[in-house]
Image (spheres, rainbow, N blue to C red):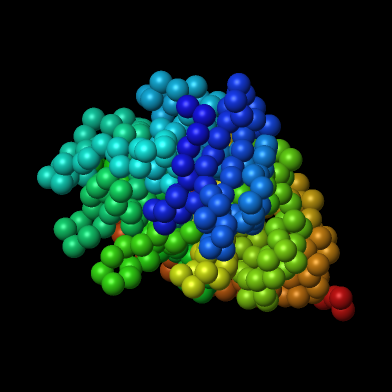
Amino acid sequence: MTDLVVQLFGEPVGRLSIAPGGDSRIPEDWAFEYLPNYVATNGVPLSVSLPLREAPHLGAVARNWFANLLPEGSVRDEIARRLRVTGTDSFALLAAIGGECAGAVSVVPDGSATDDVPVDPATSLEEALAGVGEGNWALLGGPMRLSLAGAQDKLAVVRDPSGLRLPQAGEPSTHIIKPDSPRLRGLCDLELLGLSLASDLGMPVVKAEMVTVAGTRAVLVERYDRVQHAGRIERLHQEDFCQALGFPPELQSQAQGGPTLGRCASLIRDQLGLGPAALQAFLDWVIFAALIGNADAHGKNLGLLRAPGGRLQMAPWYDLVPTIAWPARILDRTPALSIGGAPGIDRVDRVHWDQFAREARLRPMFVRQRAQTLAAAAIDALPRAIERIVMGGGDAVRLANAQRVLMANLVRTLAAVGMGSSQ
C-alpha cells in the first residue's frame, strides 16, 4: 500500500503516499499533498508545518507530522505485534489504526473509510476489558482503527447517561481512560494530583477524575478536542508542538534533539501571533512543570487547538505528572525541555529562571515574580488537593509521600525566586 486518504472532519483533504519503489521507513520517501479542490476552497490547513498549498509536502516534514499521531514505546510495539506489522513502519501502522486520531484527523486506506469492526452495543466496557492484561488496554483500539499518541496505556471511550462504553464505528469518543501503570505504580494518583492542583490554581487544564473499570483504578480524562453541538459530539482539530514545529515523535525532548522552550515561545509569539494570553499560559505551564517536578514535560505535552470558528489557541494542559514523586533511580530528573540549563527539574533556581526568561524573550523579574506567586498558591492548595484525591479513593500512603516531596520543592522554589532584583 502506497497511498492513504487523509480526512479532516470526515471529509477528504489530501493524500499521504510513499514514493514509487520507496521505503516507508525512510522519511525522505514520504509525501503529503492537499487535494486541489480543498486548496481551491481555502480550507483549514492540517498543521502550521503543513500549510495549505498546491505543491506537495515532501520528506521528513510529512512523515514527522503523521508519525506523531501514533502511539509510542511499548504500547506501539504491542499494537504492531498484534496487527503483524513492522513496529518501525509508521505508514503501515497509520493504515491499520489511523481511522480516529487526536483531533479531527483520520488516515484511512483509499475506499476504506467505513471498514471499522463494529462493536456490539450490548457489550459493556467491563466485558470488553475482561481478560485484557496490564498495559494492553490500547490494544482494544486496534480493530477499531483508533490511534492515540503517547507511551502510556490508554483507551478512548464514550461517556453517556448509561455510563462508559466503547465507541461505535466512526463515532467520536468523548473521554480517555488511563489505567495505572504496571511499571510506575501510583501513576493514576499522581497524574490526577497534577491535574487537580493545576485546576485549583485556575490553570487551563483538562477535566479528570478517578474511576474503577474492570477492577482497575484509572484516570478518566475528558477530551478537549471534542465539543457538543446540537446534541451531537463533534471533533475539533488540534496538533501538538512537535507537529507544529516539524519534529518527529522520536525527538520530543530537547536532549534528543527536539524543540526548546525558546522555540516554543517563538512559535506562540512570532510565527502564530497568538497574543499575550497564550504566552502567559505557556509561561505558567513551564513554571508549573518545575513546581510539581514534572521532568517529562516535553514538546508533545503542549498543544494547539483550532476553535470552531477556525481561530488557533493554546490547548488545555494535560499529562501533568509530578515525576519527582518517584526516586531518582527510577525516573531521570533531567527536564525534557531545559529550563535555563537546570540540571534537574527539582533544582531550578534563580539563575535558571533568568536564563529561561532571556531564551523566551521575557523579563526575568516578571518570570520570577510569577514563579513566586504560583509557588505560594501551590503551597496553600496542595494539602487540599491531596485530601480530595484520598477521599476519592486515592492511595493515602503514596499521596502523603508525594505531598512531602512536592512541598519541599515548592518551598525551595519560593526561596530561590524570592530574592530581590531590579531587572
Left or right of residue 399, residue 42 in this image? right
Q: Locate the C terminus and report the quarter of the image it occupies.
A: bottom right
Q: Does the image show residue 106?
A: yes
x, y percent for residue 109? 42, 36
Looking at the picture, tell me which residue is in the foreground, 400 or 58: 58
Q: Does the image show residue 399?
A: no
Residue located 44% across and 61% down the image: 236
x, y percent for residue 25? 60, 26
Of all residues shown, which one is farthest toward the bottom?
Answer: 422
**Residue 264 placement: quadrant:** bottom right
Residue 50 position (above or below residue 195): above
Looking at the picture, tell me which residue is in the foreground, 316 or 47: 47
x, y percent for residue 130? 21, 34
Residue located 52% across and 55% down the image: 37
Residue located 61% across and 49% down the image: 243
Of all residues shown, which one is farthest toward the left?
Answer: 122
Disc count in the image? 0
x, y percent for residue 32? 59, 42
Residue 108 position (above or below residue 239): above
Looking at the picture, tell me which residue is in the foreground, 383 or 322: 322
Residue located 55% across and 26% down the image: 88
Left or right of residue 213, residue 370 in this image? right
